[in-house]
Amino acid sequence: MKKIIRCILAVILLSTLLTGCWGAREIEHMVYVNTLGVDYVKDKVVIYIQMVNFSGIAKRESGQITQKTAIGKAEGDSFDTAIFNLYTSSPQRVVWSHIKTIVFSEAALRSDVIRQVLDEWDRYYEFRYTIWMMATKEPMEDVLNTLSISDLSVIYSQLNSPLREYEQNSIIAPMYMYKFIWKWKEKGATLLLPYIDIRSGWTEERKPNPNISVSGVCFLDNQKFQSCLKSKDILGLRWLEKKTKRTPLMIREDNKVKAVMVMTKIKSSIKPKLKHGKPVFDIKVSMQATTTELSTSFNKKKLELQAANEIEKQLMKTYLKGLEEDIDVYELSRVFYRSKPKEWHKLSAKGKLPLDPSSIEKIDIKVNLNSGGIAKMR
């Protein structure tokens, strides 16, 4: 009996040492930041936070999903002071560990504002580097208040999950923060920041339902904002992007689409060299292709040649468009710096190589059409 009493007393004493979950907070008692917007207005840094809506992630017992957006806003003389001004108006503790995306306005793409954001990210323990980086020309509140279609949570939108759409249709590669920091600091590098806008085209219950769409790239060079270009002007980027998985190509004749091809397994390389004391580059690209649409009978070799010619045109069009805006779209300066650093230091001016239309000396494209539409090909 004494042994039993001793065991009971021991259990009681040990239970008093357990901390339990008395200090835990309920999920609804905290503000979880999903997206952070950074703007710059009248010499003030303006920040916006979009809260996570957990009711849009899982269905309730009734089977209904409700979408709500809650946006917080604050401003300050710096990014850090804007955050502390946000805390003063927040109804609960703000939690940053679940943030998925940072969106900069075009006005906020200033070297001083970006440095403040990156410096703060290095210092606070809740911040992560595996978040998406984007820019926009749209009003920040409109971007963060745009609801997803079909009552999907914003967590699954292109704003917070751009990789899903990119894997199906690789045009503009999304960017993680760690790559943003690498490109921001590397010599000769051009930072390609995807920019988003609000597009119509979707409807829900016969009512217009605008959606977020990646529609271009903002370029930063030597830690300075250069310009933003639309998707139609930078189609050549995808052929040199290592992450490109699956991208369409239209073959036209007489201004009509004769074939639609899907390009995969894209491999590219840029070879720098000196010619008469001038930096020049040879570009080589190879890929596999399948046809998803053929409007007439085609010869296989002819179709491969037409695809190669179209890709070469897109590569040069993008390059020349970049030169118009003083942008090194293919990061040729970085490629040259890594291969020939001594020559780069001699030839570069203000951290950039002098480039012109003749800097790309040769483009070699190889397309291997391996399947699809066999009945219409000779």
Image: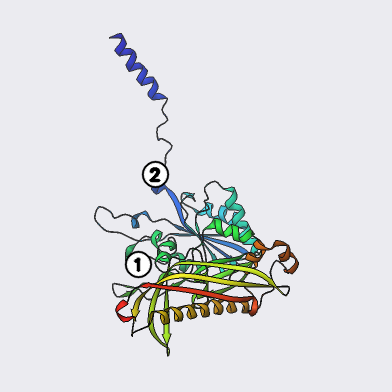
List x then y, in percent, for residue 84.
57, 52
Q: Residues within 10 Å of mark 1 (few under 14, many from 20)?
A: some
Q: Which of 108 and 272 is in front in this view?
A: 272
Q: In which quarter of the image is the C terminus?
A: bottom left
What colour-coding does the image apply?
Answer: rainbow
| Vertical relation: 129 (above or below) 233 | above
Distance of label 2 from label 1 (alpha carbons): 29 Å
Q: Which residue, as the protein is rendered here, is positioned at the far top? A: 2
Q: Is residue 303 in sight in this rendering?
A: yes
Q: What residue does disc 1 label? A: 149
Q: Nearer the viewer, residue 113 or 281?
A: 281
In this rendering, position of residue 358 left or right of residue 20: right
Q: Label 1 sits on what residue type?
A: Ile
In this rendering, position of residue 331 left or right of residue 171: right
Q: Which residue, as the protein is rendered here, is positioned at the far bottom? A: 254
Q: Label 2 sits on what residue type?
A: Glu
State which tag comes first along the sequence, 2 or 1.
Answer: 2
Identify which residue is drawn at 67% across, 75% down: 355
Identify which residue is drawn at 39% across, 76% down: 261
Identify which residue is drawn at 34% across, 79% down: 293
Element marked by disc 1: helix
| Vertical relation: 278 (above or below) 81 | below
The numbered dot on residue 327 is none
Identify which residue is drawn at 56% across, 62% down: 46
Q: Is residue 331 in sight in this rendering?
A: no
Q: How crowded is mark 2: few (under 14 residues within 10 Å), some or many (20 or more)?
A: few
Which numbered mark, 2 or 1, is in the foreground of this view? 1
Q: What residue does disc 2 label? A: 26
